[in-house]
Amino acid sequence: MLQKLKFLTVFLILGFTVYAQDQYLTARSEDLEKTYTSQKTYKVKEFTQKFKVDKPKNIIFLIGDGMGVSQVFAGLTANKGRLYLENCKYIGFSKTSSGDNYITDSAAGGTALSAGVKTYNGAIGVDMNKNPVKTILEEASEKGLATGLVSSSAITHATPASFISHQESRSSYEDIAADFLKTDIDVFIGGGLDHFNKRKDGRNLVEELKTKGYQIETDMQKIKKVKKGKLAGFTAQVHNPRMNERGDMLPDAAETAINILSNNDKGFFLMVEGSQIDWGGHAASTIYIVEDMLDFDQVIGQALKFAAKDKETLVIVTADHETGGMAITGGSMENGIVQAAFPTGEHTAVMVPVFSYGPGAKEFIGIMENTEIHAKMKKLLLEK
């Protein structure tokens, strides 16, 4: 009897842990938050379109998880007609289906972008046969470039994980965290501290990261002050909260990562994910989506600011898939009002936009498979 009780206790704990990771999938706002009314707007700067080279020295790859055309236009409307994203003059579309499903999840979508292979839903950095596939971040690191990951979710969540880990299941959070120790990534900032230091196997990966030379910070104000060296910045025990609690965490983290990585004379590869645009879609919340779309656009602004000054950096903005089937049903550009409806709380199969700015940007025009984005990035950054 005692053994059965112990088993039940462990099962319940594990079940709650998985629920805590993914409860956003079933979250619903009490009033469904259908209408967003602008509280404040920000001024958008236009950046020069002149660059030094034809092929980039650096790539900043920005993934708005769940971001389709409607999410972009909702953000544009909410900011009364302007987004930093509009500086990206080269525009295409990406087909997002996974290797085993018409509708992808973030794991397969992330792996297609990171490694250039179609795989099954739930796969992290492995192919259809569950064999590891090398990612562009890993290849960049092997060639001496600096590398980084930033996310407003746990850094072990599907999209960032697909750039650095190789696991059969996206829910293997602790195994994904352990994979970080197998790499030479220079900077990673996001949630997920529990997966590094509150583990079933008893390992304290935070201490192991320290022995590898990483600066460990858990306060965003301290993270922002780091200018060089290796950095592991943990901004939440698991996922970061919504905008009203986390504030400018994502734009600040992106700026910090860019500052550190740009110290490498050979160049760098950085992926930044705006995770919670997707979560707003799952929650059927216009307000949630718009808040995080505008937050993500501020990240785009940080990337473009650096790229315009550097003139050797390619900025690519896309999504792994669209979430919610968001339909804009009303609003006002003048007043920053957005109204929307959602036929589903899940992902959809529609194409997602691809925006680009900088040397090599013209390669991303037209309709392409998501795996082609990886191939184009690899050719531009690593095959010289």
Image (cartoon, grey):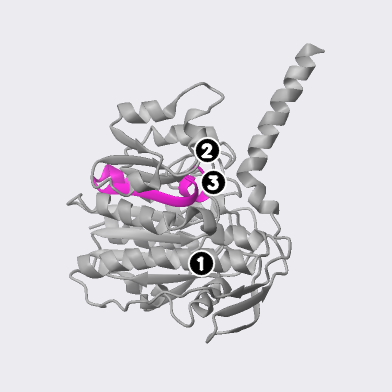
Instruction: Check disc 1 and report the residue beneath it.
Output: 293
Q: Quadrant of the N terminus?
A: top right
What amino acid type is highlighted by mark number 1? Answer: Met
Magenta span contains residue 1? no
Residue at 39% x, 63% y is: 299
C-alpha distance separating marks 2 and 1: 29 Å
How busy is the neighbourhood of tag 3: few (under 14 within 10 Å), some, or many (20 plus)? many
Instruction: Check disc 3 and report the residue beneath it.
Output: 239
Q: Position of residue 216 (x, y in %)?
A: 35, 36
Residue 115 seen anywhere in this rendered image of the structure:
no
What amino acid type is highlighted by mark number 3? Answer: His
Q: Quadrant of residue 2?
A: top right
Q: Quadrant of the C terminus?
A: bottom left
Judging depth in this view, the residue of 8 and 375 nearest the camera is 8
In the rendered image, the residue lying farthest to the front is 39
Labels 2 and 1: the sequence-earlier one: 2
User: Is residue 215 toward the left or the right of residue 123 in the image?
Assistant: left
Please tell me whether mark 2 sits on a helix, a strand or a loop: loop
User: Is residue 287 toward the left or the right of residue 210 in the image?
Assistant: right
Question: Which residues are the magenta region?
Answer: 139-162
Labels 2, 3: front one: 3
Labels 3 and 1: the sequence-earlier one: 3
User: Is residue 254 toward the left or the right of residue 145 in the image?
Assistant: right
Q: Position of residue 201 (x, y in %)?
A: 53, 22
The number of callouts visible is: 3
Residue 286 seen anywhere in this rendered image of the structure:
yes
How busy is the neighbourhood of tag 1: few (under 14 within 10 Å), some, or many (20 plus)? many
Residue at 41% x, 40% y is: 218
User: Which disc is residue 167 wearing?
Assistant: 2
